[in-house]
Amino acid sequence: MNDPVYTHLRELSWQRKLTEAEEAQLQAWLTANPDARGEWEAEMGLNRLLAELPEAPAVASNFTALVLQAVERDAAASGRASQGSRNGWSLRRWLPRVAVVCAVMVLSTFSYQHHVESNRRVMAHSVTEFSQFVVASNPELMADLDAIQWLGDLKPKADTELLALME
């Protein structure tokens, strides 16, 4: 609410309990503005809860100095820790990265092998289908199959007659 009366009364309620005159002024204002009653009740509930909070413990007079000293100690300790690891090589820092890289490499290797194997299966299936098609369409091509097989032999067989003549 932007009403200065409401704002003033709300700020007073934060600091102390309202007097009877201020309470009457508030009730008159809430009667004129009924839509603000829910907000005022929520504000009062929050004020009650804040009042019930226990008091904060007293801190030492040199609290700020103690906090700054602790921060400086932590900064010095982290500086020493980073200097202690030679050239940035620390097992705690690099082990997770190496593990992730190894996992990616293993997964990619298995994926590639699966891809190659599936391509081989597809090619073998295609060759089988093609050869069956060729045999079914032109049986004359298969008449010279022995000669074709002999030409494709990687380990030629010895000519025994020629060997016998040479001895």
Image: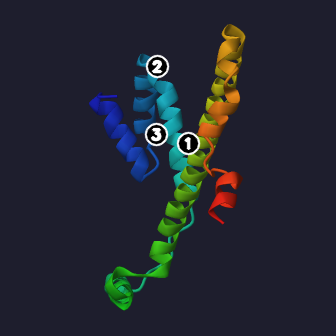
Q: SS for tag 1?
A: helix
Q: For the residue carrying disc 3, how many other residues have a C-alpha within 10 Å: few (<14), some (14-19), or many (20+)?
A: few
- Residue 20 — which label? 3
Q: Amino acid at mark 3?
A: Glu
Q: Earlier in the sequence, mark 3 or mark 2?
A: 3
Give the quarter of the image for residue 52. bottom right
Q: CA distance from mark 3 to mark 2?
A: 23 Å
Q: Earlier in the sequence, mark 1 or mark 2?
A: 2
Q: CA distance from mark 1 to mark 3?
A: 19 Å
> Residue drawn 64% across and 26% down?
127
Which residue is at the far top?
A: 137
Front residue of this view, candidates 71 and 52 = 71
Q: CA distance from mark 1 to mark 2?
A: 17 Å
Q: Amino acid at mark 2?
A: Asp
Horizontally, residue 60 falls left or right of residue 113, namely left
**Looking at the image, is mark 3 or mark 2 nearer the viewer?**
2
Q: Amino acid at mark 1?
A: Gly
Q: Earlier in the sequence, mark 1 or mark 3?
A: 3
Give the quarter of the image for residue 122. top right
Instruction: Locate residue 148, reporting x and y percent.
Output: 63, 31
Q: Which residue is mark 1?
A: 45
Q: SS for tag 2?
A: helix
Q: SS for tag 3?
A: helix
> Residue drawn 52% across and 45% down?
46
Report whether residue 23 is seen.
yes
Instruction: Locate residue 22, reporting x and y percent.
Output: 40, 37
Quarter of the image with the C terminus in it? bottom right
Quarter of the image with the N terminus in it? top left
**Looking at the image, is mark 1 or mark 3 nearer the viewer?**
1
Q: Which residue is mark 2?
A: 35
Kindly indicate whether the residue at mark 3 contacts the one at mark 1 (C-beta within 8 angstroms): no
Kindly indicate whether the residue at mark 2 contacts the one at mark 1 (C-beta within 8 angstroms): no
